[in-house]
Image (cartoon, helix red, strand yellow):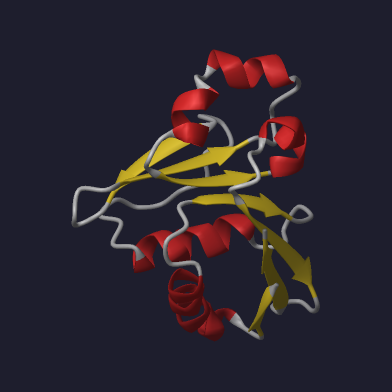
Amino acid sequence: MQTLVINSLRDLVPVARKFVKITEGNRKFAFYGAMGSGKTTLIKAVCRQLGALDTVTSPTFSLVNEYRTTDGVSLFHIDLYRIDSIGELFDIGYEEYFFGDSYLFVEWAEKAEALIPGSFLKVHLEETGPASRLVKISH
């Protein structure tokens, strides 16, 4: 397990840079954490480090956002907060996202735990203060 520490928003860019470095070779990430723990904020910073050309926003209402990098790589960002059943994942074509070659960042992954392959890295965010977080990355 790798642990990263965010003490303030100033740490976000260096932590995102380190996240990309230590997870190199992995493209699938399941994010866990309480509401407001910083899942979307960290994903935005990581996508910028990966070269996202688009503005990265929360896909809470659209469920899935796609961003392109400067190299033409697709980054998919899924937010499962509003999902009420596993069946809804099949409706959005989850297999394409979960088993494709593109990057995938899944927020509220616990809502689809039964469908998360073991190849995903699990990213747990924990609030340790008003602007501080622990980021734990594991298999």
Residue at figure coordinates x 58%, y 37% from the top left: 60
Location of the N terminus (image quadrant)? bottom right
Q: Position of residue 53 (x, y in %)?
A: 25, 55
Give the farthest residue toward the left. 71
User: Is 67 positioned to the left or the right of 26 in the image?
Assistant: left
Residue nearest the viewer, comparing 117 with 58: 117
**Which quadrant holds the C terminus?**
bottom right
Counting from the top left corner in percent of width and height, residue 101 is at 37, 41
Horizontally, is 43 left or right of 138 in the view?
Answer: left
Residue 78 percent coordinates (x, y): 54, 38
81 w.r.t. 47: above or below:
above
| Placement of 5 over or under 29, stated as above or below | below
Name the one closer to the observer, 2 or 46: 2
Pinpoint residue 114: horizontal percent, then vertical percent: 75, 31
Total numbered circles: 0
Q: Residue at x 56, y 31 (%)?
A: 61
Q: Which residue is pictured at 48% across the width and 73% down the height? A: 16
Asked if 26 appears above or below 24 in the picture, the reply is above
**Rendering quarter of residue 33:** bottom right
Instruction: Answer above or below: position of 73 versus 133.
Output: above
